[in-house]
Every structure is written in C-alpha cells, then in structure tokens.
Image (spheres, rainbow, N blue to C red):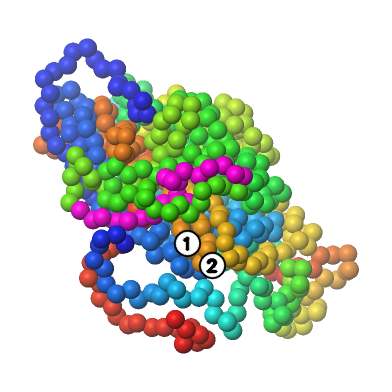
Amino acid sequence: MGTIKVGRPQAKPSTPTHVRGLHQGNRGPRHHQAGHHPDGTADARRSTGVHWKRHNKVMESMPSISPG
Amino acid sequence: MTTTEGRTRAAERKPPQMVDMSWDPITRIIGNLGIYTKIDFANQEVVECHSTSSLFRGYSVFMKGKDPRDAGFITSRICGICGDNHTTCSNYAQQMAYGVKTPPLAEHIVNLGEAAEYMFDHTIFQDNLVFVDFCEAMVKATNPSLLARAERTAAPRGDIHGYRTIADVMRAFNPFEGEVYREALKVSRITREMFCLMEGRHVHPSTMYPAGVGTMPQPNTFTDYLSRLTRVIDFVKEAVALNDDVFDFFYEALPGYEEVGRRRIMLGCWGAWQDPAVVDYRYENMNDWGKAMYVTPGIIVDGELVTNNLVDINLGMRILLGSSYYEDWEGQEPFVTHDPLGNPVDMRHPWNQTTVPVPQKRDFDAKYSWVMSPRWYHKDSDSHLALDTGGGPLARLWSTALSGLVDTPYVKATGHSVRISLPKSEKLPETTLEWHIPKWSNTIERDRARPYFVAYAAAMAFQFLEEAMQMMRAGETKVFQDFEVPDEAIGVGFHEAVRGVLSHHLVIKDKKIANYHPYPPTPWNASPRDSYGTPGPYEDAVQGQPIFEENGPEDFKGVDIMRTVRSFDPCLPCGVHMYLGKGKTLTTMHSPTYGASHG
C-alpha cells in the first residue's frame, strides 16, 4: 500500500485458499445430489421426489431432460 | 499526434471572455466524476477540460492472496449496474488459467444473460438518463428557439413510433411524466427478469461460475425468456426510430452540432458473446476464437481497422500514470515476462502492474485523478493511443461492421454497416434495421448507436435461444465442467461491459491470486492526461467543442458538455480501483467451521 498509513489488516493473506475437509464446488456435486448424472445430464428425480419416474422420458430414444 | 485536431472555426474571433465552469460530481451517472472546464463565452467554445475522479477502491490491491475461484464474485461488486459483465469476464480469464472449456449450453446461458443485460442497461441509461438532456423541459431551458422549431417539424418516422412532431417526442422524454420515460422503466424490468432467468440474480449473478453455470436448463428456462423477449421487441423497434428522428433533427436544426463531443476516431472493442463451437479459452488460439465472437473485437483508428486480433490487442495494452495519484511500479519484479506464445510482455502491461496509491491534493497542473491512463500502443505510429469506447455501442457496431465477420440469421456485418433483423412483434411487422458507419465519432453518434445495439442484442438473443433449445432437445444439458486450480497460471478475459471494453488480467501463484487487474471501460474514457501529456477521451472530446446553449454565464447549464460526457455512459466506480475513512465496525464474524485453527 505504498506509504499510506492503514490499520492492522484483518485479512491474513497467507491463509490457504482451500481448507481440507471443505467441499469444493468445482469437483461437481453429483454423488450426493439425486437425479444428476455423471455426464452432466439430469432427470426428473432432480426436480421432484413425487412419482418422479412418471415424469421421466417415455422412450429410450428421447433425451433425458429435467421437466419444467 | 494522438489527440483530435483543432476544429475549423469561423474567421472572426472575438476577444475571449473566459469563465471557469465545473460540475463535480456530475449527476445521472454512477460515481464521483468531476468535469472542470474553462469556457470562452465570447466565442461559444470550451477551451480547456479536465476530468477527475475522487474515488479510490483498490480491487487490484485486496484481490491479492485470495482464492482465484472467488474472483468472479468479488469483482462483480466493482459495479452496481454491470456487475455481471465483470463476473463473465473474470470467468473467461479463469477458464484460460484453469485450462477448462465451458459446456456449449452453459456458454449460451451466459450469452443470453449478457444479451439481456445489454438490453436492460442501455434502455435505462438512454431513456431515463440521457434523454433528460434532450427532453422538452431541458431544451426549453437551454435552447428555446430549438424547441419552437421542433414544434413545427414533423417526425419523419411517426408511422413507427406514433409521435407527430419532434417536440411531441421530446415531451415523451420528460422525466417521470413522459411516455417514453415510463415505458422504458417497464422494459428495463422485463429485461432484468430475462437476465435473472439465466444468471440467477441482477446485478451480482449467483449462478455464474468458472467452467459453467448453476442455471438448470429446463424447457421453461428458455420459453420464459422468449416470451419476455417478444414483449419488448415493439419497444426496441420504436426506440430506434425515435432516436433517429431526434438526432437527425439536432443535426438539421443546429448546423455544426456534429462538432459537439467530436473526437478523432480512436475506438476500442474487446468483443462479446463467445461462439461455443469455436471457443476453447486457450491463449494460443485466442486470435481464432476472438474473431468468432458475435461482436467482433477491434481497434479502429481514423475509420480504419488496425487489428481485430485479441493477442495484438492484449499485448498493446499499456497502463500509464502521469496525472494519477499512484507511485510507478517500473522498478518492481515483473509477473509475466512472456505470453504463452513467447511474445514479450511490457512492464506497463496489466499483467505486470502493481497498484501503489499515493493520496494527495488535487492539482490540475500535476496530479488530479484516481483514474490511471490506459492506452494502446500502436507500433506503426509509435504512439500510445487514448482509445475510447464510444459509450460501448459505437465501438462495438463500428468494429463489427468493419471486420465483416459476423454472419448470423439475425445479424449481418457488411463491411460498411450492420444489418439487424427483428421478427414480427405485437404491433410492428418484421423489420430490418441497418446501422451505417457514421462520419464522426461524436456525441450524437455515440447516443444513436445505443438503441441499435439494443436491437443487436435482442436479435442475437433469438439465435442463442434457438441454439440453446436445440441443444436441450438433443439432451445436451451439461452445464458444468469439473476442473482443478493449477499452482501457477496466467489468464486474460476479454469482454464488453455495457459501456465498452472490459478486460481482466489474472496471475496465479501457489493456487492464489498473485496479481489481478480489471480494466473496465471508464478508465479508458475518463483517464486524465498521461505521462506523454495526451488528454483522456472525455477531456479531448469536450476541449474545443462549440457551445450551442443560448444561456449566458449567469444561468449556464452546460447541457452540451453534459451531453458529451453522458454520451460515453460514464460509470466511475469501475474507473478506479478504498475508502480510507474511519469506518465503524458493527460485528466481526468468522464463519468457516473447518480449519478455524489455521493461519
């Protein structure tokens, strides 16, 4: 900060960017979020827990998308 | 010579009658911009102008040592109106640093969000802030004879917008009462809703991350957007006609008005909207994916395209001091000596910049602003060009038109113009608008380009929607790509904030930010005189401009100067990068549960 007089810093710049044990968003949440597939797609289970299978695609050739 | 040449003047010059006039802060813009002028009332012209900012914020100082993944969320707070542009740009820079490519559908969700932002922001700025300078109440107070003429002049495009005379249009611009003013508020609400569908929240998005988005692509995500978009198309078509009528009238009724805010044509545009089929965020391929952007990047000098290669644009950037309250960083260790292609990187490049603030008294003969002076080094003329953004749309349209690379179903660049096709809407039929490269880079043309760019953004939004819905129908709904943060990396993001060029330069060391420099449009536009004495764009545009206002020094409003400054869409919070007053700490909380013992 040059020659400006500033107060005692509250931030500790040497703090590690990541704390072990904390979830990292960039790894993807799929393993604990129902309805999300590993390839990035999702099905009806993602948006509803009520009769979700009935809200899914009705034919294999159709894409699996989230209802909405 | 990097400034505008002296204007041709009437042969007869009267002895000068100099009056100091200053506006500090300027209203109807964001932040603390002050304009200090010397006006010669005898010859009706501005003789000298200084633009100054009294605000320092220090983003580049406090970003150091932070997790680079937070950069998009932190830098969003630079601005209270175009924060999402910063998030997007920061994510672009991070994606380059992490070596990760966003899934195509996520790219279109970002594009759609940004398109809505352009529509929202340009509408609210033009109709609710700029038009106040052109409204009946203002013209009556500053140029009564012009209003009398407007009452007698029929509006040529009245069949589109429905107003009979130019004075009727000006009455519709009156703040709080005028029809256009009130309608624009409704439209900016709808366009903000569109934005929120894609980016979660306005203006600090909650669903935009590096390498993807958190927006869930469902059929109604896109149909909700589409239904709102079609509702505003009538307004967009009418806005273009209204603007053209009023601005043409100013040229016609006030001969010589083209000299107001005229600058030598030195425009910069860093490109907007990535093409998901081409972009890979690798620096090595930046020239290719830069040219594939749906607004072509480019630097235009004297009406000629100098370059549209993002690598050249990047390497030419120089941050000069001269009239700014900072210490030089010339003796410091550089962060980046060569770019990934092996080109040398200058010490004055944002990648190597260190911000060392030195607060001091304002002195117009020495240092007078917190804004630095970004310049672009032009090899051929060996000069540091004070590029401006033309308020954003002027440079974007100009660069896209000259490059002639954009060829999409709705928008086509022809080399000399940009053709924008908008589908049939509730009241008006299918319309093709054409923006032509103007003769001047001046106040009127900066303002005129704005509604055309709203139309451009709306047209592009149709294409992004169609492509996004096709991807969704094909089941390609992946919107996030896993990635690892590297130990060391550099990245740069190029984007267009609503009011012009935006770049974020990032250096990562030990998985932390070692250096981070956002360069938004206003440092370019509001920059003070640099170390070579070259004035910044506001100063250059206002200096020497004629005054058309009929009022004398006693009741002078300075409307011509304000029109010029506002035509650049000034936004000072982004212009300078801390308030050092004695703040009051309410509570101090520390939240991470894990790792409370570290540090």
- Regarding residue B374, the answer to whether it shows in the image is yes
Both marks 2 and 1 on one chain:
yes
Describe residue B417's horizontal placement relative to residue B252 as left or right: right
The residues colored magenta run B341-360
User: Is B346 contained in the magenta span?
Assistant: yes
On screen, residue B292 versus residue B396, left or right, reads right
Q: Which residue is mark 2?
A: B510
**Residue at 38%, 83% in the rendered image:** B589
Q: Residue B503 at what x, y percent from top left?
A: 49, 49
SS of the residue under disc 2: loop
- Give the chain of mark 1: B
Question: What amino acid type should be assigned to the residue bearing mark 2?
Answer: Asp
Q: Is residue B526 magenta?
A: no
- Determine the image quadrant of residue B577: bottom left
Answer left or right for B578 relative to B248: left
The dominant secondary structure in magenta is loop
Q: Amino acid at mark 1?
A: Ala
Please tell me which residue is depicted at 70% across the width and 76% down the height of the picture.
A30
Residue at point 40%, 34% (across, down): B384
